[in-house]
Image: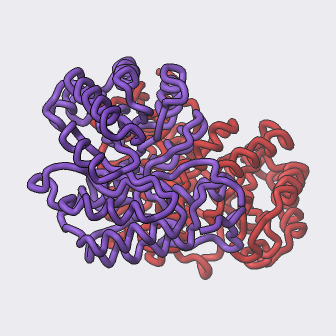
Chain colours: A red, B purple
Amino acid sequence: MKLPELLISEVGPRDGLQSVKAVMTTASKLCWIDALYAAGLREIEVCSFVPAALLPQMADAVDVVRHALTLPGLTVMALVPNVRGARAAFAAGVHKITIPVSASEAHSLSNVRKTRVQMVEEVRNIVALRNEIAPTVKIEAGMSTAFGCTIQGEVKEDDVMWLANEVIRAGVDESGLSDTTGMANPAQTRRLFTRLRAEIGDKAGAAHMHNTRGLGLANCLAAFDAGVRTFDSSLGGLGGCPYAPGASGNVVTEDLVFMFEAMGVRTGVDLDRLIAAREPLQAGLPGEPIYGMTAAVGLPMGWQQRAQYGN
Amino acid sequence: MKLPELLISEVGPRDGLQSVKAVMTTASKLCWIDALYAAGLREIEVCSFVPAALLPQMADAVDVVRHALTLPGLTVMALVPNVRGARAAFAAGVHKITIPVSASEAHSLSNVRKTRVQMVEEVRNIVALRNEIAPTVKIEAGMSTAFGCTIQGEVKEDDVMWLANEVIRAGVDESGLSDTTGMANPAQTRRLFTRLRAEIGDKAGAAHMHNTRGLGLANCLAAFDAGVRTFDSSLGGLGGCPYAPGASGNVVTEDLVFMFEAMGVRTGVDLDRLIAAREPLQAGLPGEPIYGMTAAVGLPMGWQQRAQYGN
C-alpha cells in the first residue's frame, strides 16, 4: 500500500453546512462523515465551535466530534473563532483546530469584529490555552481574503506575509491561505504560496481555494506547483459562499481528487466511494443544490486509479 | 497599445452551433460574430464546410464567411473534413482551415469513416489543392482524441506524436491537440504539448481543451506552462459535446479570458464586451443552456484589465 502524496482536507461538514440555511440532523451528519471516511478522507473539518444562537447548524458540535473520534486514523478538525470556542473544542477532544484570520483589515472587522492585531492576540491566547490544557492539539491559522477582499478590494501581499509571520510567532503550527472571495488567479497563487514557504518554511499550510469564477482547480494546480500538499475542498462544492446559481464556492472534492489522481498523484481517496458519499449528503439536505462535474459525467472510460488504498 | 500575448481562437459559431439541435438564423449568427469581434477576438471559427443534409446548422457557411471577411484584422476560419469541404472553403475566401484528424483509430473510423493513414492522405490532398488554388490560406490539423478516446480508451502518446509528424509532413502549417473526450489532465497536457513542441517545433498549434470534468482551465494553464499560446474556447461553453446537465464541453471563453487577464497575460479581449456577446448568442438560441461562471458571478471588485486594447 503506497502512501498518499497529498492530503485532501474535507471541509463540507463545517464550511458547507454552515453556509446553507437548512440544519442537517446529527444522525445525517454522522452518516455523511462515515461515508467521507469510508472514501479514504483522513482529515475532516467536522464542525465549528460557535454559539448555537449564531449558527444553529453547529449546535451538535460535541456529538459530532464524539462520533468522529471513533474513526481510526481520522484527524478530527474544528473551526474556532476565539478562546471560548477553542476551550469547547479542546474539551470535546478534537485533534486539530483552525482559526480564521483575515488578511484584510476590513474583512477582519466585519467577520470577527476585531482588528487583525487584536485577532493575532486572540490567536496567542488560544495557543496559550492549548499549551496548558490540550498540548497535543494542532493549531492552524487559515488566512481569509489572502487573495483579495470584497470589502476593501486588493489585499497587499506584504500584508498577507506580515500576518503569516505574526500568527506563526503567536505559536500556531501552520498557516494556510484562503481565497475566501474567489478572487485568486494561478499566477498569484503560485507567487503567494512560494513566498509563504520562503517566509515560514514547512509551517506553510493548506490551500483553501474557491471555484467562484471557475478557477478553483487551476488555482489548486498552481498551489501544487508551488509545493502545497494540503488542499481544502468540500464534497459537492457545498459552502464557501457561492454567489450565483451554478457557481460553487468551495472547490469540489470529487473534481479535485479526480484531477490529482488522473495526474498520477495519490490522494488516498477512492473516487467511486467519494462519489457515493454524495448520497448521504443529498439525503441529509433535501433540495439543496450540490455541484461537481466528475460526479455528473462519471469517470472516464478505462479509468483506474493507479493504486487502491486499504480502507 | 500593447500586443496580446496569446491568441484566443473562438470556436462557438462552428463547434458550438454544430452541437445544438436548433439552427441559428444567418442574421443572428452575423450579429453574434460582430459582438465577438467587438470584444477583441481576432480568430473565429465561423462555420464548417460539410453537406447541408448532414449539418443544416452550417448550410449558410458561404454567407457567414462573406460577412466575417468584412471585419478588419479578423482571421476567418472554417472546419473542413475533406477535399470537397476544402474546395468550398477556399472558394468562399476563408483565411484558415482546420482539419480534424483523430489520434485514435477507432474514433477516426467512427468520425470520418477513414483510417488515420487514409485521413493523412486526405490532408495531403487538401494541402495540394491549397497550394494550387489558395496558396495564402493557412491549414491547421486539430488532433482529436489526443488525450483519450471514449471508444478505444487510452490513446498512446506515441500515436499522437506519430500522427503529428505525419500531418506536418503532409504539409499543414500547424498541428494542435484536442481533448475531444474531456479525458485530459494537467500532467498529461504539459507532457504532450512539451513533446509536441520537441517533435514539430513552432508548428505546434492550439490547445483545444474541454471542461467535461471541470479540468478545462487547469488544463489550459498546464498547456500555457508548456508554451502553448493559442487556445480554442467557445462563448458560453457552447458545444464540445457536453455529456451532462451543467457540464460544459468546450472551455468557456469568458472564464478562460478572465483567468489569463487576472494572471496579467494579455489576451486582447475586453471582458465586459465579451460578456455582452452572450446576449446575441442567447437571443439567437432561445432556451439553449449556456455556461460560464465569470459571467454568472460578475467581475471581482476592483477588477481592471491591465491594459485596454483599441477595438
Q: What residue occupies the far left of the structure in this picture? A: B53
At x 57%, y 30%, the residue is A5
Q: Quadrant of the C terminus of chain B?
A: bottom right
With B127 as the anchor, is B5 left or right in this view?
A: right
In the rendering, at what x and y percent does residue B71 appear?
46, 64
Work out whether A59 lies above or below A307: below
**On the picture, is B298 further left or further right than A178?**
left
B152 lies left or right of A215: left
Q: Nearer the viewer, residue B311 or B305?
A: B311
- The residue located at (68%, 65%) in the rendering is B305
* Displayed quadrant of residue B151: top left
- Is A111 on the left or on the right of A68, as rendered? right
Q: Nearer the viewer, residue A215 or B221?
A: B221
Q: Quadrant of the N terminus of chain B?
A: bottom right
Residue A32 coordinates in the image, percent (x, y): 40, 55
Residue B7: x, y in percent? 54, 49
